[in-house]
Amino acid sequence: MRFFRNLSVLLFSPLGILVFLLASCEHKELCYDHSHTVDVRVVLDWKNAAEASPSSMRLYLFPQDGGDVLSYGLADCRGGNITVPTGCYKILCLNSDTRSILYRNIGRFTDFEAYTVNDVLVRRSASTPRADGTQEERVARSPDRLWCARADGVCIGESDRLLTLYPEEAVCRYRLEIRHVENLKHIAPDGISGALSGMSGGLFAGRGVTGTEVVTVPFGIIRGDSTTLTADFLCFGCPPPPGKKHILTVYAFLADGGKYYYSYDVTSRIHTAKDPRDVPIIIDSLHLPRPITNGGGFRPSVDEWQNMNIDIPM
């Protein structure tokens, strides 16, 4: 009887309770910590974008059973080591060395969107005319080079310590060539630029589809030779159908102060391109006026733009 009385005292004493808890924990791996993490080696295989060499990457892990997104910086574009809670994830990986690209809705895989900051059509003019039908479009800066890798249903556990991803080009390249340009020598220094309307304002990186916002993207134009102009710029691509027309506008400042803009409907050129990620646009001629000298002829006001709408033979 004394034995049972002593046992009862021991069990309900603070020491007894501690002994009981310690004993029960001997049979449970995670008594105090209900989460478990593992070290994972991330390998970025650039076989789908062999020329890419971003300076840094960012990895996003979206838990499939809910919870906050996990974010990891990688200083090496070839990969690195991270510590991850075990579980199943949807995964995004993008280069993080961009300047003009911003992100929104980063907590949701399907809504994770890349977009660019606002821009101006022409930097040397405060009031720049827009092509007809494009006045309501936001003017959005051309994006930087962007590479993206995505994966769904990736489970990380004790035996899964290697994660291999395959980044690909996520933006589109547009190459403009204007041939047989007349009077190109009369253009003011840095006096020519362009803009392309009807483009998508963003990219849903998780789904790999362009956003529905329609924007105009300005870009620089350079002289190739005495009769040729060229441009090479990036954008997110076309928005989902039905979309809008793609109007290419060339803005020209002449040495005598004259200002002209030329509009081309290049919708068919873009929609019929063999590779939607590498779109060539070739315009066969552009007539720039000669400067007015010795007071002869009509000289428009320095604030007045002259519009030239030009049809492109297909």
Image: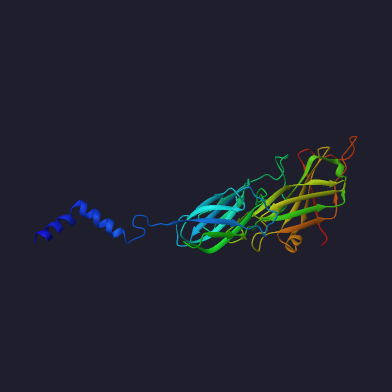
Residue placed most toward the observer, 21 or 147: 21
Give the side of residue 12 with respect to residue 112, left or right.
Answer: left
**Image point (73%, 55%), residue name:** 174
x, y percent for residue 300: 81, 40
Locate residue 116, reporting x and y percent: 62, 49
Task: Let me know if residue 213 appears in the view.
Answer: no
In the foreground, 16 or 107: 16
Q: Is residue 61 left or right of residue 168?
A: left
* Percent coordinates x, y for residue 308 in the rendering: 80, 50
The residue furthest left is 1
Identify the image's colour scheme: rainbow, by chain, secondary structure or one colour: rainbow
Which image quadrant for residue 273?
bottom right
Q: Quadrant of the C terminus?
A: bottom right
Q: Position of residue 210 (x, y in %)?
A: 63, 59
Q: Nearer the viewer, residue 183 or 170?
A: 170
Q: Is residue 147 visible?
A: yes
Q: Is residue 69 left or right of residue 200?
A: left
Marks counted in the figure total 0
Q: Residue at x 74, y 60 (%)?
A: 270
Task: For the N terminus, give its image quadrant.
Answer: bottom left
Q: For this view, does 128 lie left or right of residue 1?
A: right
The single residue placed furthest to the top in the displayed view is 294
Residue 271, quarter of the rendered image: bottom right
